[in-house]
Image (cartoon, rainbow, N blue to C red):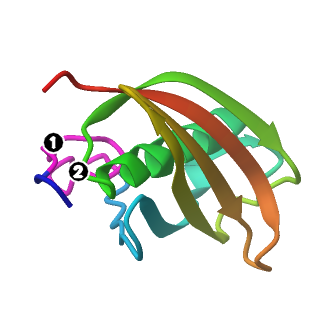
Amino acid sequence: MDKPTERDDSCFCCGQGNEKGLHLVFSYPREGEAEASLAVPEHFSGWKRMTHGGFLSMLLDEVMAHACIGSAVTAVTGEITVRFRKPVETGTTVRLLGKVVEKKGRIIHTRGWILDSDGESAAEGQARFVAART
């Protein structure tokens, strides 16, 4: 990695100092990749114990942002697209995977996946991030 990426301890998803946050812990298996897991809290139910789609979208956004962090880039989401493949029941554990696919100037193209407890894709995303000016 070129330089350390600034973190915010109050982030809802990964901030360890946010008492109401998810406290996700990310690992970076390879440059430009990130992963984490989460037991989906019951209170993020959208309908009949199905995890709310907005919550899943947020998780995809976060893992793709961490893929940028995994390539030593501070960036913000410019655009995100989410495709829901199957419902995720609350209370189950999901695995989050993110990957930087391409960098063009300040634009970073990413992909993300949420795998259910059977390892099947429950939701997939792609996003364009805009890197901070250096």
Residue position marked by numbered label 1 in the rendering = 8
Q: Residue furthest right?
A: 86
Question: Circle 1 — which element?
Answer: loop
Residue 61 locus on image (x, y percent): 51, 39
Residue 18 shows in this picture = yes
Horizontally, is 116 left or right of 62 in the view? right
Q: Crowdedness of circle 1 by 10 Å Cα count: few (<14), some, many (20+)?
A: few
Mark 2 highlights which residue?
15
Q: Amino acid at mark 2?
A: Gly
Residues 33 and 57: in front is 33
Q: Is residue 32 above or below residue 50?
A: below
Dot 2 falls on a residue whose secondary structure is: loop
Q: Is residue 91 left or right of residue 37?
A: right
Query: In the picture, which quadrant includes the C terminus?
Result: top left
Asked whether 123 falls inside the magenta stretch, the response is: no
Front in this rendered view, residue 102 or 9: 102
For the point 38% across and 27% down, the residue is 105
Q: Main secondary structure of the magenta part?
A: loop
CB atoms at circles 2 and 1 under 8 Å apart?
Answer: yes
Which picture quadrant has residue 8?
top left
Can you tell which of label 2 and label 1 is closer to the viewer? 1
Q: Find residue 66 and report its horizontal and vertical position in percent.
A: 38, 51
Work out how far the residue at label 2 is from the one at label 1, CA to CA, in angstroms. Answer: 6 Å
In the image, 18 versus 134, the foreground residue is 134
Residue 92 as seen in the image, left or right of residue 77: right
The N terminus sits in image quarter: bottom left
Q: Is residue 79 above or below residue 111?
A: above
**Looking at the image, is mark 2 or mark 1 earlier in the sequence?**
1
Q: How far across and down, in percent of the image, does residue 72 sit?
A: 24, 51
Residue located at (82% from left, 43% from top): 84
The range drawn in magenta is 5-21
Q: Amino acid at mark 1?
A: Asp
